[in-house]
Image (tube, grey):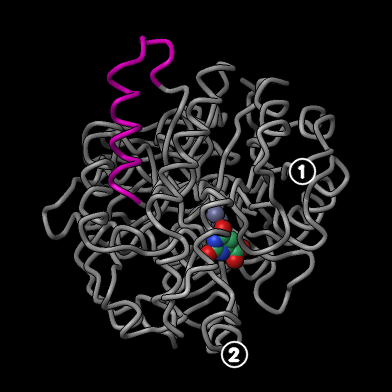
């Protein structure tokens, strides 16, 4: 274990600017940032030509442990994550058994403390009967409600249960937003083709919009902190934008939205023509006008941050025909290169990336001491080379699932090294696995 590191002459990305300087780290914390620092450190890193960003916080992954370890484990998922500059994750509750009690949260935290290479925490899943567990479990990012069914059997879609969850307690509620009755009705359509294009006729934009409207009304009525996961339609962006501009200051961030890289960068019909059921996810990828609306929403801060919805399934599982193939695709190791590539193209700035991938997660989930390169904060840092060009490929995937929907995409801008709590865990293709991540500390609302 290394106690002190001095990173020299690196471009440092702050919330609103990029400045060259040094970063001094001791016992896992950033102790000093500035030009020409003078500390004698155990290890020195020459940062010339590199850029330091806050370690990515991925607030939405499905690491599959316990219950589906052949797809991913907390260890394999965290290894994939750290190679992509991710230093913290929140994992979703649709594991087996479902993570719906204080005890199952505790079990996951124990697995993570023994095996996760990065920092971790876990959502608790809502059911019709676990209200007490939802509110008594300590130090979790929030309650996850599947308001529409997806992978696993978690679903709460009746008004009575939803009202009792929204009206009891105060912690953040994150939702999978698709209206279940609309999905069920569309499944009965007689004009559905016998291929993956049926997916979008069942899980329509209307299903997503209807559910987001319903959840928004509940949050406003009960004054409850609501987060919409993986927003997929420009119409939902409009709903969130109207709320942001229409609500008084103290309520502006009562309701927030997240977006995944795949929903911004992949679209129909190409994705199904090229990848078939490998492109099948919930809510679905959509047509390009929605992609543009999502990007616009991110750029004007209507959508607050990126979450990958890393949902690994094996190649054999995804190869099955529509109706048998599970929904979901991986993403935890490709989100930062995909976003840095947008910086290289001049579509956004490095400080946008810092806010979308770390800072806003920390702010809006009340995460302590993370998300920014600031004195006193945890030394979760990713060093990137903004000029390196590499092609994302199935062969290089670290996740156990062994494939990516971005196979063949060239990105300019890649992580070179990732520090977690002041320790180098990933550097130029090598992993240093003896030190484990820590439980992320979260303040309640
Ligand atoms: O496509 C999806 N896959 N959407 C979800 O909501 C769940 C996820 C999974 O766990 O596979
Ligand atoms: Zn979801
Ligand atoms: Zn998800």
**Label 1 SS:** loop
The residue sitting at 42% across, 61% down in the picture is 417
Q: Is residue 81 visible?
A: no
**Label 2 SS:** helix
Residue 400, percent across and down? 60, 78
The residue closer to the viewer here, 223 or 104, is 223
Above or below 423: residue 221: above
- Give the farthest residue toward the left: 346
- Give the farthest residue toward the right: 103
Q: Quadrant of residue 244?
A: top left
Above or below 312: residue 15: above
Magenta residue span: 233-252
Q: Quadrant of residue 260?
A: bottom left
CA gap between label 2 and label 1 equals 31 Å
The residue sitting at 33% across, 48% down in the picture is 52
Residue tagged 1: 127
Residue 142, percent across and down? 65, 35
Check disc 2: other Cα within 10 Å, few if <14, some if 14-19, many if 20+: few
For the image, the number of numbered tags is 2
Q: Earlier in the sequence, mark 2 or mark 1?
A: 1
Quarter of the image where ligand 1 sits:
bottom right
Residue tagged 2: 316
Residue 112, percent across and down? 74, 55
């Amino acid at each position: 274990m290394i106690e002190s590191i001095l990173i020299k002459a690196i471009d440092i990305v702050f919330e609103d600017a990029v400045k060259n300087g040094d970063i001094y780290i001791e016992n896992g914390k950033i102790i000093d940032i500035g030009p020409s620092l003078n500390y004698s450190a155990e290890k020195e890193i020459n940062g010339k030509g590199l850029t330091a960003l806050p370690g990515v916080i991925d607030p939405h992954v499905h690491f599959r442990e316990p219950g589906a370890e052949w797809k991913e484990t907390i260890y394999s998922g965290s290894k994939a994550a750290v190679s992509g500059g991710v230093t913290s994750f929140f994992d979703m509750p649709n594991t087996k058994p479902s993570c719906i009690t204080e005890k199952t949260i505790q079990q996951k935290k124990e697995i993570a403390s023994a095996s996760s290479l990065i920092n971790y925490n876990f959502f608790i899943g809502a059911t019709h009967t676990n209200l007490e567990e939802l509110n008594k479990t300590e130090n979790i990012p929030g309650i996850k409600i599947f308001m529409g069914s997806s992978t696993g059997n978690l679903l709460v879609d009746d008004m009575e249960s939803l009202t009792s969850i929204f009206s009891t307690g105060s912690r953040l509620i994150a939702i999978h937003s698709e209206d279940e009755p609309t999905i069920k009705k569309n499944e009965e359509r007689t004009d559905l083709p016998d291929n993956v294009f049926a997916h979008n006729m069942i899980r329509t934009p209307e299903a997503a919009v209807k559910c987001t409207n319903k959840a928004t009304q509940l949050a406003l009525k009960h004054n409850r902190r609501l987060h919409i996961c993986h927003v997929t339609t420009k119409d939902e962006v409009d709903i969130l934008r109207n709320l942001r501009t229409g609500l008084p200051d103290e309520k502006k961030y009562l309701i927030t939205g997240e977006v995944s890289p795949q929903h911004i960068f992949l679209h129909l019909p190409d994705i199904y023509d090229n990848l078939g059921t490998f492109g099948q996810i919930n809510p679905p990828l959509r047509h390009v006008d929605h992609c543009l609306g999502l990007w616009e929403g991110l750029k004007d801060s209507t959508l607050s941050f990126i979450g990958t919805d890393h949902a690994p399934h094996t190649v054999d599982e995804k190869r099955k025909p529509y109706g048998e193939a599970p929904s979901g695709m991986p993403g935890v190791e490709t989100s930062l290169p995909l976003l840095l590539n947008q910086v290289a193209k001049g579509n956004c700035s490095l400080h946008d990336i810092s806010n979308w991938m770390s800072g806003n997660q920390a702010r809006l989930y009340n995460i302590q001491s993370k998300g920014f390169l600031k004195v006193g904060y945890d030394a979760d840092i990713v060093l990137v080379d903004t000029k390196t060009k590499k092609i994302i490929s199935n062969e290089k995937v670290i996740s156990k699932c062994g494939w990516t929907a971005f196979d063949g995409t060239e990105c300019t801008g890649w992580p070179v090294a990732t520090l977690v709590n002041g320790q180098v865990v990933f550097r130029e293709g090598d992993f240093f696995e003896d030190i484990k991540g820590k439980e992320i500390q979260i303040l309640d609302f």
